[in-house]
């Protein structure tokens, strides 16, 4: 491609399209991102690569019609961030993707299925009830019949049947301590499907001396809406979060779902510092130096894309390494993405399934008797994959092993 050509193209008059054009023109089309893109690894088509999607974005900015095939290739993107990590030109691909998805012609392709998933995400008790019903359907042997009608239903039923009961929401209430210093954020999906992680996180923080206010009644940072191009809804959800955290009186917040951290930080901006739960726990462990009970067993640690592209899962590795006797096998980063990507697995099982298979094989090859991950979506999708492989290993957040090590 002629590197001068983008400089000769006119800038769109619409500010949103002009911003997309500027971000797209930063791409030099070198292809360094292609070996790192999960969807390109499965499809082996240029349109399923970051480079191809950048070209599509620039064409939309110039006024090209958004035909269904091109929108589908854009929609297939997992937004894992691997391309940004390796891009020599520093293309801000995530920002570009959000901008393109907010264009009216792209938003018009939003489906009722995706809207339903986003609605469920902010209603944890309804989501938990739906998952329980899904478990019953799967155990009655009806899943295959529904999957033949719609593969997306099959993916959801797989997840529902694999999720352990204690992870599902039993109530939707927040709680607060007197003079709380920390707000513990469960997020929207986490409020429904990680009540066990929320419990273990609260207990661990309190044992390490923190006064904790739990914000767990389906409060959403707005990431799902923003990634779907609905900025107005994302802003509305963000405002509700800020109001709820302010009501706790806590000066800082922590989140246990690693995939939500960046969006929580953007949502709360300057008002409330937000940190990863495990970073907070590590600081308190260093200060308190508690005696930790030994734990035997081999744990396979899956570092999700959101952390791998930020700090390679440093905090998760350190927390598990601090537990005496625990043998931790880190799954190599070369396996890429597991395919979960938030709610992506439910809407794109044709991509998510093949991506998960390689990760499941890598987990089983370690000989581990359990799996640790910090990402809610990864936990759901990998648990279903392990069941499908005939090896239903328990899968938890690293905080659960630390909580056990702190038990009296």
Image (cartoon, rainbow, N blue to C red):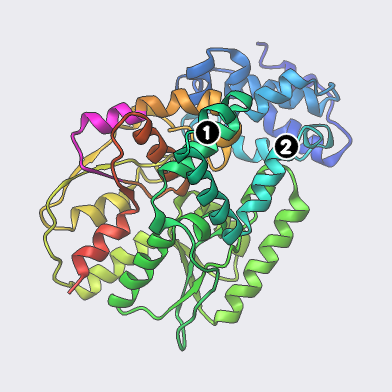
* Residue position for label 1: 142
Q: Is residue 169 visible?
A: yes
Q: Is residue 36 visible?
A: no
Seen as rendered, the residue at the extreme front is 140
Report x, y in % for residue 230: 75, 47
Q: In the rendered image of this protein, does residue 62 appear above or below residue 258?
A: above
Report x, y in % for residue 258: 45, 51
Report x, y in % for residue 238: 67, 62
Q: In the rendered image of this protein, does residue 399 appear above or below residue 63?
A: below
Does the magenta-highlighted stretch encompass residue 380? no
Report x, y in % for residue 357: 39, 25
Q: In the rendered image of this protein, does residue 370 appear above or below residue 170?
A: above
* Residue position for label 2: 101
Residue 144 vs residue 266: left or right? left
Quadrant, the C terminus: bottom left
Residue 322 vs residue 107: left or right? left
Depth check: 296 or 241 in front?
296
Query: Which mark sits nearer the N-terminus, 1 or 2?
Result: 2
Say which residue appears at 80% left-offset and 20% top-offset: 67
């Amino acid at each position: 491609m002629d590197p001068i050509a983008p400089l000769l193209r006119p800038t769109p008059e619409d500010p949103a399209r002009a911003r997309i054009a500027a971000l797209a023109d930063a791409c030099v089309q070198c292809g360094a991102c292609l070996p790192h893109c999960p969807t390109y690894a499965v499809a082996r088509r240029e349109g399923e690569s970051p480079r191809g999607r950048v070209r599509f974005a620039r064409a939309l900015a110039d006024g090209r019609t958004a035909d269904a095939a091109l929108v589908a290739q854009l929609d297939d993107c997992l937004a894992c961030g691997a391309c940004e990590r390796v891009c020599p030109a520093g293309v801000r691909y995530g920002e570009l993707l959000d901008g393109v998805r907010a264009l009216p012609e792209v938003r018009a392709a939003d489906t009722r299925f995706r809207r339903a998933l986003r609605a469920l995400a902010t209603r944890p008790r309804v989501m938990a009830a739906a998952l329980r019903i899904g478990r019953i359907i799967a155990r009655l042997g009806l899943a295959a019949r529904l999957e033949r009608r719609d593969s997306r239903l099959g993916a959801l039923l797989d997840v529902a049947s694999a999720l352990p009961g204690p992870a599902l929401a039993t109530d939707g209430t927040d709680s607060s301590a007197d003079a709380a210093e920390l707000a513990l954020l469960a997020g929207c999906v986490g409020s429904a499907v990680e009540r066990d992680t929320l419990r273990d996180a609260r207990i661990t923080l309190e044992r390490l001396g923190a006064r904790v206010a739990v914000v767990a009644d389906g409060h959403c940072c707005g990431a799902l809406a923003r990634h779907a191009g609905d900025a107005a809804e994302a802003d509305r959800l963000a405002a509700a979060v800020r109001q709820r955290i302010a009501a706790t009186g806590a000066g800082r917040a922590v989140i246990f779902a690693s995939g939500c951290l960046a969006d929580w930080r953007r949502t709360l901006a300057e008002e409330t510092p937000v940190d990863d739960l495990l970073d907070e726990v590590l600081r308190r462990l260093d200060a308190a130096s508690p005696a930790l009970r030994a734990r035997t067993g081999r744990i396979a640690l899956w570092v999700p894309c959101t952390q791998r592209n930020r700090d390679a899962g440093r905090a998760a590795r350190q927390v598990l390494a601090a537990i005496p006797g625990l043998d931790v096998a880190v799954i190599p980063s070369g396996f890429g993405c597991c395919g979960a990507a938030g709610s992506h697995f439910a809407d794109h099982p044709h991509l998510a399934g093949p991506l998960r298979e390689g990760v499941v094989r890598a987990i089983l090859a370690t000989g581990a008797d359990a799996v640790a991950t910090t990402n809610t979506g990864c936990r759901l999708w990998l648990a279903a994959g392990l069941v499908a492989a005939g090896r239903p290993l328990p899968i938890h957040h690293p905080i659960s092993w630390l909580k056990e090590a702190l038990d009296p």
